[in-house]
Image (cartoon, rainbow, N blue to C red):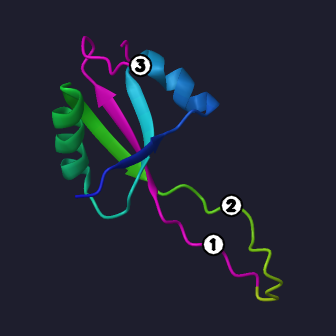
């Protein structure tokens, strides 16, 4: 089963933490339902909603290809909304 690759720390992702929405990059293969179950089991939280999208690929390749071939997106962005009283600790205590 695929999983979360890393958390996203953009300005928008940091602002959405106030609404209990956590952004992360994930593999392309799992569905929203699989990711929801995986996050609930791993973090022991209640997931209210899960949204996903593929972010834009970025700039053109610098291989000198005259056709302007674009890079392929190999991940998707997951935005997970949690129940109000169930935060995920960003910096776990030891």
Quick check: marks 2 and 1 in contact, CB under 8 Å? yes
- Tell me residue 12's x, y (percent): 58, 31
- Residue in the image at 57% along x and 33% along y: 9
Looking at the image, which is closer to me, 92 or 22? 92
Q: Which label number is shown at residue 58?
A: 2
Which marked residue is nearer to the observer: mark 3 or mark 1?
A: 1
Helix, strand, or loop for circle 1? loop
N-terminal-most mark, 2 or 1: 2
How far apart, in angstroms, are the residues tagged by discs 2 and 1? Answer: 8 Å
- Tell me residue 18's x, y (percent): 46, 15
Numbered range of the magenta stretch: 68-94
On the rendered structure, is 6 left or right of 64?
left
- Residue in the image at 30% along x and 40% along y: 50
Q: How many marks?
A: 3
Looking at the image, which is closer to me, 6 or 83? 6
How far apart, in angstroms, are the residues tagged by discs 3 and 1? Answer: 33 Å
Q: Which label number is shown at residue 71?
A: 1
CA neighbours of label 1 inside 10 A, class few (<14), some (14 to 19), many (20+): few
Q: Which residue is mark 3?
A: 19
Q: Which label number is shown at residue 43?
A: none
Magenta stretch: residue 50 in it?
A: no
Quadrant location of the C terminus?
A: top left
Helix, strand, or loop for circle 2? loop
């Amino acid at each position: 089963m695929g999983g979360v690759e890393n958390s996203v720390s953009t300005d928008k992702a940091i602002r959405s933490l106030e609404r209990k929405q956590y952004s992360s990059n994930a593999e392309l293969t799992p569905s929203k339902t699989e990711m929801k179950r995986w996050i609930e089991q791993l973090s022991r939280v209640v997931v209210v909603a899960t949204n996903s999208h593929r972010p834009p690929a970025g700039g053109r390749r610098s291989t000198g290809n005259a056709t302007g071939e674009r890079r392929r997106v190999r991940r998707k962005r997951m935005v997970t909304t949690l129940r109000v009283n169930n935060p995920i600790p960003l910096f776990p205590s030891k």
